[in-house]
Amino acid sequence: MLETASQALAERGWWLGTDAVDMDLVDDLRTDLDQLRDNDELERAGIGRDLDFQLAERVRGDRIHWLSRGSDAQARLLAQMESLRQTLNESLFLGLFEFEAHYAHYPPGSFYRRHLDSFRGAANRIVSAVIYLNDDWRDGDGGELVLYAESGDEVLATIAPKAGSMLLFLSEELPHEVLPARRDRFSIAGWYRLNASIGNQIDPAR
Ligand code: OGA
Ligand code: MN
């Protein structure tokens, strides 16, 4: 599966695996995320490094929590993403250095307008990964991720955020958006980054 993923990334810039994450792990991640919500540990997402939340609200309405190895479910997912990092580096010579990711909760009515995850030349986010945590997502629930071709409005794929799916795509090349969700929508969004350290100062991850 990992080999197929790197091949698809190289050839067309994106890959979708519908059973990429074990259901046991998906359940544990959802339980973990529900607990974080109960404890008020999600924060409004910003855009870019300067957080202008009023502007951000018109662009994206999700609430996020950055993953760490502090919880068992998060550590298991990060371990899986680490194997994938190694496979991508071995087959595509990408030199991916680290993976950062956050949980995201999109309340009903929220969306994320069309955007790119990284600007070419920023040498920052190279491969985006999105993992979905929603059981029984139905047609009509909205919240699809629409992936666009690099230039123009051609739609490459419209992806329902179904539990166990993982989407990978090239961060600098493919614009995408999250359509308004009609029910609570849960995902993990993450990025494989290059080591953008200058001198001996490590580039801050966020
Ligand atoms: C993002 C993003 C997509 C999703 O957080 O940058 O595009 O489906 N998320 O949650
Ligand atoms: Mn994005």
Image (cartoon, grey):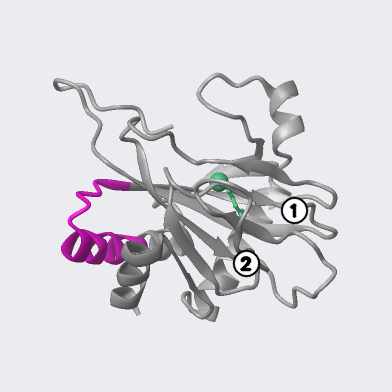
Residue indicated by mark 2: 133
**Residue 80 in view here:** no
Secondary structure of the residue carrying tag 2 is: loop
Relative side of 42 to 127, left or right = right
Residue indicated by mark 1: 179
Using the rendered view, name the quadrant where residue 15 is placed: bottom left
Residue at image point 42% right, 64% down: 77
Q: Look at the image and say whether residue 126 sits in the magenta stretch.
A: no
Image quarter (top left, top right, bottom left or bottom right) of the C terminus: top left
Q: Position of residue 169 (x, y in %)?
A: 44, 57
Q: Along the polypeptide, which appears first: circle 2 or circle 1?
A: 2
Using the rendered view, name the quadrant where residue 64 is placed: top right
Asked whether mark 2 lies closer than 8 Å to ligand 1, one says no
Image quarter (top left, top right, bottom left or bottom right) of the N terminus: bottom left
Instruction: Name the kind of residue labelled 1 in the image.
Output: Leu
Relative side of 105 to 84, left or right = right
Judged by its main secondary structure, the magenta piece is helix
Q: Residues within 10 Å of mark 2 (few under 14, many from 20)?
A: many
Secondary structure of the residue carrying tag 1 is: loop
Instruction: Name the kind of residue labelled 2 in the image.
Output: Leu
**Residue 86 in view here:** yes
Task: Please name whichever residue, 62 or 167, is drawn nearer the observer in this view of the structure.
Answer: 167
Q: Look at the image and say whether residue 91 sits in the magenta stretch.
A: yes
- Magenta range is 81-98
